[in-house]
Every structure is written in structure tokens, then in C-alpha cells.
Amino acid sequence: MSETGFNLSEYLKDRRDLFNQYLKAGLEEISAEPELVRAMQYSITAGGKRLRPVLCMAAAECVFGSMEKAIAPAVAIEMIHTYSLIHDDLPAMDNDDLRRGKPTCHKKFSEATAVLAGDALLTHAFSILSNPGLICEESLHPENPIRIISRISLAAGPEGMVSGQVMDMNALKNTDSKDLDYLKSMHAMKTGAMIMASVETGALAAGGDDQSVRRLSSYAENIGMAFQVADDILNVKGDPAVMGKAAGSDAAADKMTFPSILGLEASRKYAFDLVSKAIDSLASFGGRADALREIATYIIERDR
């Protein structure tokens, strides 16, 4: 529990439990080839922090909205995030055997099934966004559905997460590169774009005004980068038994990371500076932003 009395552990558990109920509903209504559905369900129910949907719901509450207003974008974003993990793990990409302590989708099923499961989650996400009634009674704020769909598609597509992944693969071809600006740009797209979309669409779904969305966007931009810096540090110093995946894989693959360019201590300082900037962006929201403040700190203190 923090000095303000806010219990982040309890908050995260409550929001994850609520979210998982809606996510289950979003999966149960799928009528498709059984092997495909099993692969989708296997990947999306394999655990995980549910950081993006929790951020989405917390942002809705921050603008005086109901967190249920953010359920549809939260579910869609988690489906898109899971699709990206399935594809990242493929032999043609990162070639990982474990994800969250379990065999990756292509190891559990087949490479072809994993590709198609990712495709299915990506496209089904937009079915949920365009028809929130599939999973919940709360609808999006009536003025913002198109803005929400546009914001998420931009973050997930060629100007966001997909380009970030291409930049990551290209960086592997040039292992001598120490370009910090390139690294920041890569992760702003690969990781940060969907985190920003989570926060922004949560606020939009609850009817947040443009000024509130801009302030929350600044928060999200900083925690998105801090999240990746923390991930890079964990890959060096983390406990594989806790993380559910191997440590040291970035160094073994000669990947460009914040520790490889800045060093561990400078990377930690950079992460703390980013979180400080993120928290400063929330000043006008008062106690309504306590959850977002605590999540920002959690991002750089987590062990997985």
C-alpha cells in the first residue's frame, strides 16, 4: 500500500478479475474452427499483467467516467497485444519457445495455426470495437467510437507497432549500432504506441475532453518508454523462474537495448526520470489519478 493509502495490488486484482470476465465473453461468442479457437484462447488466457486493459479502465475513471465504458477498447487492445506476442514469438521473428512460462503458441499448436490465431485475434478485436454489445451493456461515449477505432488502428498498424517490429528486426542486422535515437523511436512505436492508445481510448470511451486526453497522452508516452526500459533491464537481471521466460536472450541475440547502449545504472535512472515526468502530467487530476500514478511506479519496480 502506498503512502496515500492506495492499495495497488488490490486494485490490479479487482480490475483484472473484472476484465477477464468480459474477455471470456468476447472469446466465447466466437464461432469458428475449433483448433483455431483453442489456439486463440490458449494464448490470451495464458496469464500476463493485463497492463493495457487496466490502464484503459483507469483512464476512464480518471475523467469521471465509468470503467465499464472502457471495456470494449480494453478487450480489443488485449486481443491485439496478444496477436502481436504470438507473431513476435514465431521462428521468423524472435523464435521464442516460452511465453509466460508456457510453450509459445506455435510450439503448442503449429506455426501455421499460430499465424492464423494471431490474425484472428487482430481482426476480432475490431468486431468488438464496432459492436461493444457483444460483450457488455455499456456502450462507448456516443461522440467517440470512430476516434477510438482510428486511434487503436493507428497504434497497431504500419505507423505504430508493426513498424516498430520491423525496426527491431532491422536493428539485429546491424549489431554494431549504438543509436539511442533509433532505439527510442523503435520502442515508441513497438511498445509505446499501444500503451498510449490504451490510455487515450479509455479516456475517450468515457467522454474525456481533449485537454484531459492530451495530459493523459503525455503520461502514457512516458510510461510506455519506461516499460520498455524496465523490460530491457529485466532481460539482463531478471529471474527466469519469476518472469516465465529466459533471461539474457537479448544479449545472446545481439539485440539493441537500453542497457547495451546506456549501461544498467544509466538505464535505471532514465526509467525513473520517465516515470517522474509521467506522474507530473497527472497533477490536474487529483486523487482520480492515484491508480495511474501507482501503475507508473509499478512499471519500473516489477519483477516480470
Image: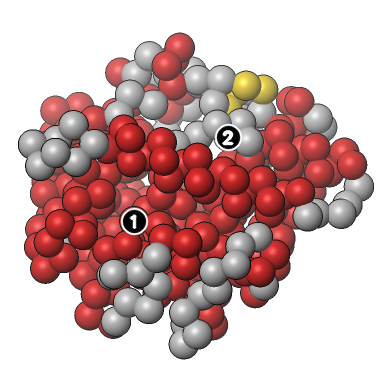
Whether residue 67 can be seen here: yes
**Where's residue 30, x and y in %?**
80, 54
- Against 12, is 215 above or below? below
Q: Which residue is drawn at 61% across and 31% down?
A: 46
Q: What residue type is labelled 1?
A: Ala
Viewer-side residue, 241 vs 175: 241
Q: Which residue is drawn at 10% across and 58% down?
A: 280
Callout 1 crowding tier (Cα within 10 Å): few <14, some 14–19, many ≥20: many
Name the residue at the right extreme: 33
- The disc labelled 2 sits on which kind of residue? Asp
Q: Position of residue 190 (x, y in %)?
A: 45, 53
Write the residue at 39% across / 65% down: 66
Q: Where is residue 36 in the image (x, y as percent from the top left)?
A: 84, 43
| Residue occupying the far bottom of the picture | 143
Q: Looking at the image, which is closer to me, 186 or 126?
A: 126
Element carrying mark 2: loop
- Earlier in the chain: of badge 2 and badge 1, it is 1
Quarter of the view holding residue 14: top left
Decide if residue 74 is on the left or right side of residue 131.
left
Give how far apart the Cα atoms at labels 2 and 1 are: 32 Å
Query: x, y (%) of residue 291?
Result: 25, 49
Local secondary structure at mark 1: helix
Residue that label 1 marks: 58
Residue bearing mark 2: 94
Residue 71 as seen in the image, left or right of residue 285: right
The residue most toward the front is 137
The residue lying at 37 percent from left, 53 percent from top is 55
